[in-house]
Image (spheres, rainbow, N blue to C red):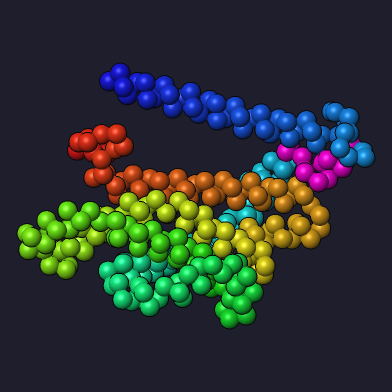
Amino acid sequence: MDAIKQARKYQFKLRIWQFGLLFAVFFFWHVATKPGLIPAIVFDNEEQAAFFFGEPLVIFSRIWDWFVVNADIYTHLWTTLIETVLAFTIGTVTGGAVGMWLALSPFAAAVADPFIKGLNSMPRVILAPIFAVWFGLGVASKVALGVTLVFFIVFFNVYQGVREVNPTILSSARMLGADKRQLLKFVYLPSAMSWVFSSLHTSVGMAFVGAVVGEYLGSSEGVGYLILQAEGVFDINTVMAGILVLTLFALILDWIVGEVEERAMRWQPRAGTGTTLKGGF
């Protein structure tokens, strides 16, 4: 009971410091960009700081208009969400399947090795214009770009996770008569799961990047499209508002992945303990 109280107290203290730091950042931003509050130091006049970095109060007002007054951002958010979820799902499934297959097939892995390395070393963002030509300016081109970003993250983690299976556990399972399907279900998949979930936080971010970059390069909907339109008229406040919305959106997606991980990995021992499992089982 004392441990629970201490944990809650620590979490409360942690949140206070986090919100305090966030407030300090926005306060400094406001003071540095509000004309007349401090003398112009870096720029020639006091208006230039606001032009280049935006004003927090104006930015928050723009976000309020998007969500409450005009309520015109939801269509764009939905488009970006669909692109992100599709890219994340397809990239995770295909990356995991290929990673599992090559990890269990040494000869196939040796054949594919130079091709995998070559594709992984390629800056995949440059594929965005090609995907736009192939799939058009709709959702498909953004999903394709996101898949290329997610695939290799999951692939390498699954591949490494399967290769890192404890030889003693593997030998014991074989001695007990486990066939290939049972080895896959009870040995290889559990070993790969922790590696997969460790990569999902990065993967969802990359899927998000793929969607936004694709929208930025060519689209008619999405938060990236809103930012592009604002940038075209040098509206830094709208650009910053879009960036803040995207940041919050990404944090929510990352939190969802964390919750799924917490529930899916309840069987895994907590760090520093040998017997206590997540969830108290």
> Toward the viewer: 41 or 175?
175
Q: Position of residue 40 (x, y in %)?
A: 89, 34
- Residue 32 in magenta stretch: no
Can residue 139 be seen in the rendering of this structure? Answer: no
- Residue 47 in magenta stretch: yes
> Toward the viewer: 123 or 135?
123
Residue 219: image quadrant is bottom right
Q: Which residues are magenta?
A: 46-57
Q: Position of residue 229 (x, y in %)?
A: 74, 61
Q: Is residue 47 left or right of residue 107?
A: right
Q: Is residue 278 left or right of residue 109?
A: left
Instruction: Name the outermost residue toward the bottom.
Output: 134
Name the image quarter holding the C terminus.
top left
Residue drawn at point x = 50 percent, y = 28 percent? 15
Residue drawn at point x = 78 percent, y = 30 percent? 31
Q: Name the magenta segment's main secondary structure.
A: helix
Residue 110's place in the image compared with 239, above or below, is: below
